[in-house]
């Protein structure tokens, strides 16, 4: 039987294998790293904190507008995108992509599926 950690690592690995995602991390809302699949110079803890900070800022801003909880945030850059997807009230799925924003739909679908798998596991 697989441990929760093994299941989460498999979900993140599958996510990287099926799309143009360069890194992914499951992060608590306060920025603690729960699981990750990153490579290169990117530090998992830094990536986790970045995702949580982006989400927290958006949550605070939208609370003032009475628009409800944030489900997804996409930060577009010249080289790719940082996407945070809400898993539940405790966790976020943070991903780094290398794709053009016009081609994000398939990636977003994969991220959403992964978030649902994580939610079932937690």
Image (cartoon, rainbow, N blue to C red):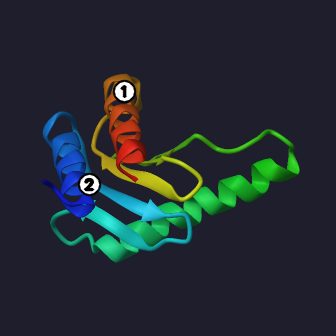
Please give the name of the residue rendered at 42% of the width and 45% of the height, measured from the top-left corner: 119
Whole-angstrom CA distance, mark 1 to mark 2, is: 18 Å
Image mark count: 2
Name the one closer to the observer, 11 or 4: 4
Name above or below for residue 66 compared with residue 48. above
Secondary structure at numbered mark 1: helix
The answer to whether marks 1 and 2 mark residues whose Cβ atoms lie closer than 8 Å is: no
Q: Which residue corresponds to mark 1? A: 109
Q: Which residue corresponds to mark 2? A: 8
Farthest-out residue, front: 1
- Residue 110, position as x, y percentages in the image: 31, 31
Residue 81 appears in the picture as rendered: no
- Say which label, 1 or 2, has the lower sequence index: 2
**Is 17 left, or right, of 21 in this rendering?**
left
Please identify the quarter of the rendering in which residue 38 is found: bottom left
- Residue 97, position as x, y percentages in the image: 31, 45
- Residue 54, position as x, y percentages in the image: 57, 60
Please give the name of the residue rendered at 23% of the width and 46% of the height, measured from the top-left corner: 11
Please identify the quarter of the rendering in which residue 14 is found: top left
Residue 47 appears in the picture as rendered: yes
Mark 2 surroundings: few (<14), some (14-19) or many (≥20) residues within 10 A: many
């Amino acid at each position: 039987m697989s441990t929760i950690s093994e299941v989460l690592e498999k979900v993140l690995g599958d996510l990287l294998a099926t799309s143009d995602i360069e890194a992914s991390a499951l992060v608590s809302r306060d920025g603690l790293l729960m699981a990750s699949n990153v490579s290169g110079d990117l530090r998992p803890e830094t990536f986790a904190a970045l995702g949580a900070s982006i989400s927290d800022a958006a949550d605070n801003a939208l609370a003032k507008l009475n628009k409800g909880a944030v489900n997804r945030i996409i930060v577009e850059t010249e080289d790719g995108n940082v996407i945070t997807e809400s898993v539940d009230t405790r966790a976020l799925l943070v991903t780094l992509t290398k794709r053009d924003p016009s081609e994000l739909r398939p990636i977003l679908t994969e991220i959403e599926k992964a978030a649902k798998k994580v939610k079932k596991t937690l």
